[in-house]
Amino acid sequence: MKKVLITGAAGFLGSHLCDRFIKEGYYVIGMDNLITGDMNNIAHLFKLPNFEFYHHDVSKHVHIPGELDYILHFASPASPIDYLKIPIQTLKVSSLGTHNLLGLARAKKARILVASTSEVYGDPLVHPQTEDYWGNVNPVGPRGVYDEAKRFMEAITMAYHTYHGVETRIIRIFNTYGPRMRLNDGRVLPAFIGQALRGEDLTVFGDGSQTRSFCYVDDLVEGIYRLLMSDYAQPVNIGNPAEITISQFAEEILKLTGSSVPVAYKDLPVDDPKQRQPDITKAREILGWEPKVDRAEGLKITYDYFKSLPKEELFKTEHRQFDKAN
Ligand code: UDP
């Protein structure tokens, strides 16, 4: 049985990856320090003989006994309000954490895939974003802690590939959504759905003309799986090119939830990218991958998930112990 280590296993993407690798017949070791992750996302896996959980922070030395075939590094706060609250932890997990995992991959002769992001393009001056665009990032702005950590992650990953011959894969993930997103993590989809369900105004930041392109989680997981199994070591964009403005997105959420709450316009956060759309030519050509789930279908599944949560979840503002995180 092949063994895979998944960091960030209790998070949104990590938990879906655990499900996928269990389904493919792997022995899965999930690792998480539970700062932004949630054990409820993986509770159903604990009864399985081929799942094991390590409560550990990957920015500290990582020890895994025995053999290891694959590593997927998905640990990191990923929403702007999270990485503003825990900036140093955000920097450490993608720098020190990636270094530890690359060392582990080298020692075990394991293949490693790291989760990079469309944020490496910053507020992009090229549209749609191709992998050969180097980006427009403000290193000292509020998003710098995330963006620069992920850029460092890519650099050190390529260095281990080039100088140590480690088998590495780099995915650049664009906005992704689906069940198990945290209702209060501040990202636009859970924010809007939560507001609609509570009967509050929908908070659109800026004039709502900024764009995003939303990918359903199952499509993303398929892209990750294919990239891991490929022999391609350069970065690959995975995302859904269907681009919309945030104002249009608010309208879609109102329609989906049958809500008629008003839209309230708030200040645009500093360095909020004005447009974002993946060019997925590489993923199409190298992985034979493209998204299959359209937004109407994906949003319906996600809305049903949020509706199924206990009512008190809807009214929780923040329950994370961020103060101890750095
Ligand atoms: N946004 C918004 N209202 C909210 C939350 C986010 O208008 O309550 C906007 C945000 O300013 C950004 C877009 O929605 O332009 C996507 O934000 P998100 O935090 O989901 O992810 P980002 O792509 O910015 O990392």
Image: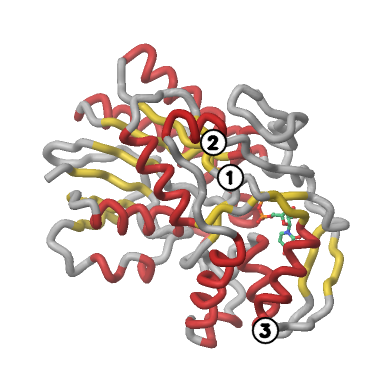
Q: Identify which residue, 309 or 250, lies in the foreground.
A: 250
Instruction: Give the labeled residue for mark 2.
Output: 237
Instruction: Give the labeled residue for mark 1.
Output: 174
In space, the residues marked 3 and 2 are separated at their CA atoms by 35 Å
Instruction: Give the labeled residue for mark 3.
Output: 198
Residue 319 visible somewhere in the drawing: no
Q: Residue furthest top?
A: 163
Residue 143 visible somewhere in the drawing: yes
Q: Residues within 10 Å of mark 2 (few under 14, many from 20)?
A: many
Q: Is residue 221 left or right of residue 262?
A: left
Name the mark nearer the viewer: 3 or 2: 2
- Marked residue nearer the N-terminal end (3 or 2): 3
- Residue at the image point whose x is 63% and y is 29% from the top: 130
- Marked residue nearer the N-terminal end (2 or 1): 1
Residue type at mark 3? Arg
- Residue at the image point whose x is 83% and y is 57% from the top: 208
Query: Quick check: marks 3 and 2 in contact, CB under 8 Å?
Result: no
Query: Quick check: marks 2 and 1 in contact, CB under 8 Å?
Result: yes
- In percent of width and height, residue 256 lies at 66, 76
Residue type at mark 1? Phe
- In percent of width and height, residue 68 lies at 19, 37
Number of the label disc, if any, that sits on residue 251: none
Q: Residue furthest bottom?
A: 311
* Vertical position of residue 242 compared to residue 247: above or below: above
Name the mark nearer the viewer: 3 or 1: 1
* Vertical position of residue 170 compared to residue 56: above or below: above
Q: Secondary structure at mark 3?
A: helix
* Vertical position of residue 47 compared to residue 87: above or below: below
